[in-house]
Image: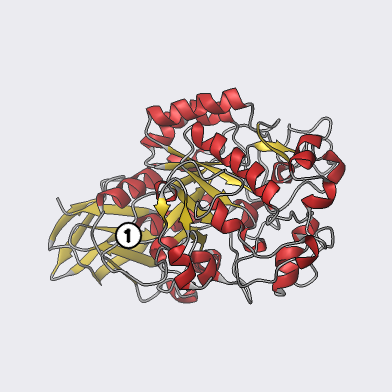
Amino acid sequence: MNKILALSLCVGISGTVVAKDRVTHNPDVTNTESILHAWSWNFPTIADNMRKIAESGFTMVQTSPVQNCYEPAGSGKKIFDDNVTEGNWYYYYQPTDWKIGNNILGTRDQMKQMMDSAAKYNVKVIVDVLPNHTAFDIDAVSDDFYKAVGGRDKMYHSNGLQPVEDYNDRLQCTLWGSGALPDVNTENKDFQKYYMQFVNDLLSLGVKGFRYDTAKHIGVHSDPVDSASGVKENDFWDVATGRKSVKGVSLAVPYDSLFVYGEVLQDKNVKEKEYAEYMNLTASAYGHALRTVLDKADFAADSLLSWHHPAEGKKLVTWVESHDTYANEHESAGLTDQQIRMGWVFLASRQNGTPLFFSRPAGSTRENFWGNNRVGARGNDEFKHPEVVAANKFRKDMSGTPEKVISTDNGAVIEVSRGSSGVALINISGQEQNLNGLETTVPDGEYHDRVYNSIFTVKSGKISGTLSPYTSYILYNN
């Protein structure tokens, strides 16, 4: 988008909206929030665990998609079923209508009860939304949905039922079916109105933000327009982010009051800077770099001092893994829970980025990725592990303090110092590590770790102590 144009766009209920600078680095900015991705947990389960989520230090919880979705008979029982009879996790990523409720998460009333619990414990709820496509089975899409957008022929882009062949071709990427999912004509004004009514319904329940699935498959202004469908401009993001209204419907709350990020997975020809004018973005390349470091147990195995992204770190959502890297092709599923935990402590201790903790299925192992394999159930206990809790608390306590990230010569121990206020030490290896004078920014003295009460000593600006395999330590200067 032309930056001058972006600065002039308006929205009826909240006046002129100024595009945020999400590229220029500000060394004084610190991020303190963190997200628990309660993947495949249902509304009652999230509600029942809200107190524990808050006590674990997470400030936001992200749900799976809540809209009506593809629900073949007998589904809604398993996260994954080889026989495709008792359900699969990707069903709830196949919208059939923009109304709250499905057989995986629960009803609108159950969602309201979850929202009441979130408000009680001061946890923000983010909803995963996916306006880019519908279910594979277009006959499963509701009549109400088709009617609302002007009929089935108005639902999809002119080549929306054609599977993408080249994801680096922006015309195919934004106007054809990604993953063969039918590509919605997101520029259709009737669709935009119907979708925004759904968004506003969620906001009326107290939702505080959104994750936009397949965001890079919805075009920005510089992308090709689908003139065959009567499209004149790619303005979905202007409507979704409150810069303009559509047929009398506007975003019901000021956009700046929400936490919104887009799944803009990095690849060739992805317009990260243009997407960044609208929302926070996923740091998918950084996640890959971090997993490489964890897998090799060597800080030098990839660069973690660069965000691998044109957007600044303060506007990125970071992760060790996402539900896609875990569930799609199991790219990250081979990492142990201990390795994931070490990666989390690293991300949570850093000055910038908003880290997302993916909740793996309960009972999962490196041989059995689906574990107990029940949709709706709580994930494993890692989200409340003492080291995760300590890192989340450290993140909030270090607000306003700059970071310095270094490692030992062998790359096995990563240190994240936060000014003179505190330090996180992370052993990413499977062997005990003895520190004998690693540079640090905290004052000289004796420090006791907040989880294990292990003792570390700082003398002449060098820290010493012993770290157990795959263990992290949080030290405060107080």
Task: Measuring from the top left, give residue 321's x and y in whole percent.
Answer: 55, 56
Is residue 149 visible in this depiction of the protein? yes
Between residue 470 and residue 37, name the one nearer to us. 37
Q: Note whether 164 is above or below 17 in the view shown.
A: below
Residue 156 vertical placement versus 204 (above, below): below
Question: Would you call the spot at circle 1 few (<14 residues within 10 Å), some (14-19), or many (20 or more)?
Answer: many
Label 1 residue SS: strand
Left or right of 177 on screen, residue 396: left
Name the image colouring. secondary structure
The picture quadrant where one finds residue 117 is top left
| Residue at position x 47%, y 48% in the image | 12
In this rendered view, identify the residue nearer to me: 118 or 298. 118
Name the residue at 66% across, 42% down: 194
Q: Which amino acid does label 1 sit on?
A: Leu
Name the image quarter holding the N terminus. Answer: bottom right
Q: Which of 357 and 1 is in front in this view?
A: 1
Residue 140: where, in percent of width, then height? 83, 39
Q: Quadrant of residue 456?
A: bottom left
Mark 1, residue position? 425
Q: Residue at x 36, y 47 (%)?
A: 392
Q: In this view, does 213 lie to the left or right of 290?
A: right
